[in-house]
Image: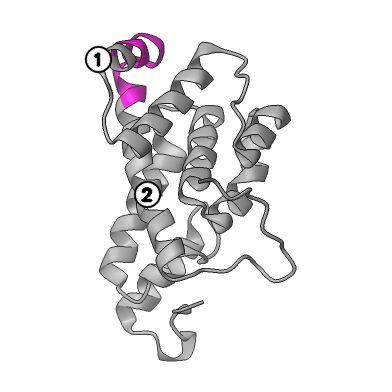
Amino acid sequence: MRLGPPDPATMTDDQRRVHDNIVAGPRGRVRGPLAIWLHRPELAEAAQNLGAYCRYGSALEPRLSELAILCMAVIWQAEFEWWAHKPLALKAGVGPAVVEALRTGTPPGFPDEETAVVHAIVTRLSTERRLDNALYARAEAVLGRDRLVDLVGLCGYYTLISMTLNAFDVPLPEGERPELVQQV
């Protein structure tokens, strides 16, 4: 790890306030990218608020948002994100076969059009940086405007997370092993 979390004994008042707000929320603890961002409490606070919306306030049901998060983890090869969200995705209803296909880089067989569209949107935005008219129309028809907007926002947020994890070389918790098959 290139940068660890701030030392609790030397946190500024702003760092302590943001830390305590995160701990008091649904996450219950500060780890991963939030621990890095805490060096800049204003960034941590803003990112935490966006993340709370993306995770807990979005129009996307957890099955779709967790699928999108796993897709982002694979695209960015962000092991920590994969580790943190794989159990959540399985619990939310993303099938084990889909999770394994994502992990190994093989084309997943999606059980419905919503999950297929989420995967297509995340993949296309992350690799080609835009959506063609046909995919946009398909996504709007399948997901609707609100869920599509939330999906794009989630992709942006998890790009920030993945960049942070990779830039600062955030490790998996002790005893955990990498799972992702390196994608080229």
Question: Residue 53 falls in which quadrant of the image?
Answer: top left
> As shown in the figure, which amino acid type bears the numbered disc 2?
Thr
Q: Earlier in the sequence, mark 2 or mark 1?
A: 1
Residue range (magenta): 137-148
Relative side of 93 to 48, left or right: right
Considering only vertical position in the picture, is 129 above or below 82?
A: above
Query: Which residue sits at x=49%, y=61%?
Result: 24
The x, y position of residue 16, in whole percent, is 39, 77
Instruction: Identify the disc placed on residue 159.
Output: 2
Mark 2 neighbour class, 10 Å CA radius: few under 14, some 14 to 19, many 20 or more? some
Question: Looking at the image, which is closer to me, 73 or 12?
Answer: 73
Query: Which residue sits at x=70%, y=71%?
Result: 174
> As shown in the figure, which amino acid type bears the numbered disc 1?
Asn
Instruction: Identify the disc placed on residue 133.
Output: 1
Residue lying furthest right in this view? 175
The x, y position of residue 86, in whole percent, is 64, 44
Relative side of 171 to 159, left or right: right
Instruction: Identify the disc placed on residue 6.
Output: none
Residue lying furthest front in this view? 184
The x, y position of residue 143, in whole percent, is 39, 16
